[in-house]
Image: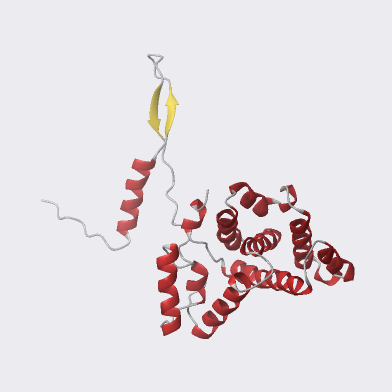
């Protein structure tokens, strides 16, 4: 009698992958000698979860502070998950708390800009920078706040294709110019925002939201930060 071979831990994923290939395989038509069309399975590779790992750096998570533990719990209750950007920053409580405080102030705090307008800026800037994380996560936010999936797609791909109000076109033109050619911003650019109905405080907020996402985009791209897969299906 042959002894059963021993399998190491590395054998299990391979076995699981084979099983997944077998069950997930699509069908391709073939014609046997009889002339009748039949379907045969075509093996497909099994992809890893798109958001695992969260970033491409090995940074061990720190113990959450009481404030951040409560914040993570609130995210779970409200969203059903903790955004991966928070997990990425969770190796250092000082950095995490600073990031959360600045984000919440800019995106959720009092402002002459609506939450939707701030999200539109986030996505238009992220589109210029081709930031995968922010395009997915904030594209979902645009869809949610606007109730318009088409607007979310426009912001991700090319905001100029959207039928925008004069106010929103001026706002996004300024944010995108600030992203790509910040040294060219002049009084005429600020004046255009004023003519579109923005106050000087609004111009400050537009600039700060655009600046924040330029920073965030670069950190996300540098670390290959992956958006939670749940975002892809939200508000569609």
Count of marks placed on residues: 0
Residue at x-position 32% and y-position 46%: 19
Where is 70 relative to 169, above or below? below
Q: Is residue 206 left or right of residue 146?
A: right
Which residue is outermost to the top? 34
Q: Quadrant of residue 28?
A: top left
At 62% from the left edge and 52% from the top edge, which residue is drawn? 152
Viewer-closest of 97 and 40? 97
Please state the horizontal and vertical placement of residue 95, each as a whole percent of the image: 55, 82
Horizontal and vertical percent position of residue 172 = 74, 60
For image coordinates 76% across by 71% down, the residue present is 203
Asked whether, in this view, residue 168 is left or right of residue 219, the answer is right
Return the x and y of residue 195 as percentages of the image width and height. 84, 63
x and y, in percent, of residue 134 in the image = 60, 62
Q: Evaluate whether residue 201 shows in this view.
A: yes
- Tell which of 129 and 107 is nearer to you: 107
Displayed quadrant of residue 121: bottom right
């Amino acid at each position: 009698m042959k002894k059963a071979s021993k399998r190491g831990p590395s054998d299990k994923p391979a076995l699981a992958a084979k099983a997944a290939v077998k069950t997930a395989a699509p069908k391709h038509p073939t014609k046997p000698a009889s002339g009748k069309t039949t379907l045969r399975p075509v093996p497909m590779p099994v992809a890893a979860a798109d958001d695992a790992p969260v970033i491409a750096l090995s940074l061990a998570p720190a113990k959450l502070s009481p404030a951040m533990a409560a914040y993570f719990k609130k995210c779970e209750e409200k969203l059903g998950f903790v955004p991966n950007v928070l997990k990425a920053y969770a190796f250092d409580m000082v950095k995490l708390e600073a990031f959360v405080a600045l984000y919440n102030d800019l995106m959720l705090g009092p402002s002459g800009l609506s939450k939707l307008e701030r999200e539109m800026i986030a996505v238009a800037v992220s589109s210029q920078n081709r930031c995968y994380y922010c395009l997915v996560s904030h594209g979902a936010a645009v869809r949610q706040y606007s109730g318009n999936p088409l607007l979310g797609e426009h912001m991700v791909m090319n905001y100029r294709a959207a039928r925008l109000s004069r106010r929103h076109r001026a706002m996004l033109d300024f944010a995108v110019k600030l992203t790509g050619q910040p040294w060219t911003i002049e009084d005429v650019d600020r004046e255009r925002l004023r003519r579109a109905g923005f106050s000087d405080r609004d111009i400050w907020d537009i600039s700060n939201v655009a600046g924040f996402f330029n920073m965030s985009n670069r950190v996300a791209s540098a670390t290959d930060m992956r958006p939670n897969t749940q975002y892809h299906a939200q508000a569609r």
